[in-house]
Image (tube, rainbow, N blue to C red):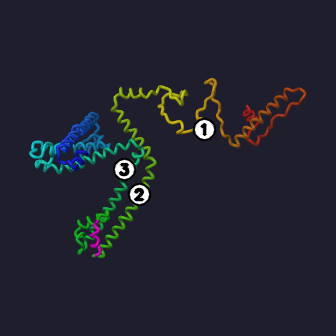
C-alpha cells in the first residue's frame, strides 16, 4: 500500500529518495509476501496430491481446501496477481533505460505498454489484501459477530439490487420505445444509464429540466423513484432489521467458535517444545491464593485487582474448623411457610414420643394413649410421623 498508493503522491515524488523507498517496499512485497504465498499454495497442492483431496471445477481438479475456505481462494487470487505484477513491474522494465530519469525509475517509455495493466492488478491486489485483513476481526468477539451477521445478510442485499436492476431495465426499455425524448433518454443504452443514475441519486441536477419536456417521461421517472426509494429501500431495511435480530443472538457463539478454530489452526504450527515451555511458565500446578496467606486450589491463573474494586459485605468463602473428614454443616436456607409448619410438626411428634416413653416407664400412671391413628392435616400417618421424627 505504501509503495503503490502513498509514495507517488508525496511532494518529493520522482526524487531519488522516493524511487529508492518505492523499490525497497516492492522488493519486500515480492521477496517475503509473494514467496510465502507461493510456498503455502504449493504446500496445499502437495498435501492434496498426497491425500487425494481434490474438487473438480469444470473438469479442472483443484485442492479441496481452496474451495472450502474463502480465505484460501482469496490468497490464491492474490498470489496470481502478485506473480503477474512481478513480471509487469515497471521498475524492472526501466532498469536498463535510466537515461536522464535516475535509477529505479518507472517512468521510462519502455514501461508504457505494461503500466496500465500493472496499475489495475495493483488495485486488485490491495483490495484482496484488505479482504484478508478482515480476518483479524476474530480478536474481538463483538466485531467478529458483526462481520458474520453482515455476511449472512448479503443475500438480502443481492435480492434488493436484483429488483432494482429489474426496474431499471423495465423503465429504461419502456421509455426508449417512445420517440422525441431528451438527449439523456435517447436509445436504450442512454435510458438505462439515466435510470441507473436516478436510482443511485447521481443524475445531474442540471438535467432534471429535461424531464419537464415530456409529461410521460416525467411520470415514468417519478414512478421509478417512488418504487426504488420508498418501496425497495424500505423493504431492504425491514429485511436487514429482521435478519439482524434473528442472527445477532447466535452469531456471538459462532464468533467464539471461529476464534477457537483460529487458535487451533495456529497451534498446529507451534513446536511442541515451545508449547511445553509455555505451559510450564503458566505454573498451573502451584496453588492460587485467595488472599494473603489464604491458599486456594491449583490449576488457575491468578489475576490481581484492587481491593476496593469489588467490595463484598459478606464473605463468599465459608470456613469451618474441625476434622476435614466430617461432613460440612448444612447451610441456612430460607424456609417457606409450609416447610416451617412441617418442621414444627416434626418437633411436636418428637415431644409426643418422648412423653409416651416416659409414661411407659412409670408404674403408678396408666399408659399414655398412642398417637392419633387418623391422618393429620399435614397428610401423614403415625408411622410416617414416627419416621419423620426420627
Q: Which residue is mark 1?
A: 313
Q: Position of residue 244 (x, y in %)?
A: 43, 53
Helix, strand or loop for disc 1 = loop
Stretch of the chain drawn in magenta: 203-212
Q: Residues within 10 Å of mark 1 (few under 14, many from 20)?
A: few
Residue depicted at x 77% and y 33%:
350
Q: Earlier in the sequence, mark 3 or mark 2?
A: 3
| Membership of 205 in magenta stretch | yes
Residue depicted at x 36% and y 33%:
267
Residue 352 relative to residue 328: left or right: right
Q: Residues within 10 Å of mark 3 (few under 14, many from 20)?
A: few
CA distance for labels 2 and 1 = 49 Å
The quadrant where residue 16 appears:
top left
Picture disc at residue 367: none
Q: Which residue is mark 3?
A: 151
Residue depicted at x 36% and y 68%:
226
Q: Are marks 2 and 1 in contact (CB under 8 Å)?
A: no
Q: Earlier in the sequence, mark 2 or mark 1?
A: 2
Picture disc at residue 239: 2
Residue 92 relative to residue 367: left or right: left
| Membership of 179 in magenta stretch | no
Residue depicted at x 39% and y 41%:
139
Which label sits in the foreground, 3 or 1? 1
Amino acid at each position: 500500500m505504501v509503495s503503490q498508493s502513498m509514495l507517488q503522491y508525496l511532494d518529493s515524488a520522482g526524487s531519488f529518495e522516493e524511487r529508492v523507498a518505492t523499490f525497497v517496499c516492492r522488493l519486500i512485497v515480492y521477496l517475503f509476501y509473494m514467496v510465502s504465498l507461493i510456498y503455502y499454495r504449493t504446500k496445499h497442492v502437495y498435501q492434496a496430491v498426497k491425500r487425494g483431496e481434490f474438487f473438480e471445477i469444470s473438469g479442472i481438479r483443484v485442492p479441496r481446501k481452496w474451495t472450502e475456505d474463502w480465505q484460501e481462494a482469496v490468497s490464491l487470487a492474490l498470489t496470481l496477481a502478485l506473480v503477474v505484477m512481478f513480471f509487469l513491474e515497471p521498475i524492472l522494465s526501466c532498469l536498463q533505460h535510466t537515461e536522464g530519469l535516475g535509477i529505479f525509475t518507472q517512468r521510462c517509455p519502455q514501461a508504457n505498454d505494461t503500466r496500465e495493466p500493472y496499475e489495475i492488478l495493483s488495485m486488485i491486489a490491495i483490495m484482496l489484501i484488505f479482504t484478508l485483513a478482515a480476518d483479524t476481526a476474530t480478536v474481538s468477539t463483538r466485531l467478529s459477530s458483526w462481520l458474520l451477521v453482515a455476511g449472512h445478510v448479503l443475500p438480502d442485499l443481492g435480492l434488493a439490487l436484483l429488483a432494482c436492476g429489474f426496474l431499471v431495465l423495465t423503465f429504461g426499455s419502456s421509455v426508449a420505445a417512445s420517440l422525441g425524448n431528451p438527449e439523456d433518454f435517447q436509445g436504450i443504452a442512454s435510458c438505462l444509464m439515466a435510470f441507473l443514475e436516478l436510482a443511485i441519486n447521481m443524475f445531474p441536477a442540471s438535467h432534471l429540466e429535461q424531464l419537464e419536456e415530456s409529461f410521460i417521461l416525467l411520470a415514468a421517472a417519478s414512478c421509478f423513484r417512488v418504487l426504488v426509494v420508498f418501496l425497495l429501500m424500505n423493504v431492504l431495511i425491514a429485511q436487514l432489521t429482521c435478519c439482524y435480530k434473528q442472527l445477532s443472538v447466535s452469531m456471538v457463539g459462532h464468533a467464539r467458535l471461529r476464534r477457537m478454530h483460529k487458535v487451533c489452526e495456529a497451534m498446529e504450527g507451534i513446536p511442541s517444545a515451545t508449547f511445553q515451555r509455555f505451559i510450564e511458565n503458566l505454573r498451573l500446578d502451584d496453588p492460587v491464593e485467595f488472599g494473603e496467606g489464604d491458599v486456594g486450589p491449583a490449576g488457575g491463573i491468578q489475576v490481581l485487582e484492587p481491593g476496593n474494586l469489588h467490595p463484598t459485605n459478606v464473605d463468599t468463602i465459608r470456613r469451618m474448623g474441625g476434622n476435614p473428614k466430617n461432613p460440612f454443616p448444612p447451610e441456612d436456607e430460607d424456609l417457606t411457610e409450609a416447610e416451617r409448619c412441617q418442621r414444627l410438626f416434626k418437633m411436636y411428634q418428637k415431644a409426643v414420643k418422648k412423653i409416651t416413653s416416659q409414661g411407659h416407664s412409670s408404674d403408678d400412671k396408666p399408659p399414655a394413649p398412642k398417637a392419633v391413628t387418623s391422618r393429620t392435616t399435614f397428610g401423614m400417618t403415625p408411622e410416617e410421623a414416627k419416621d419423620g421424627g426420627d
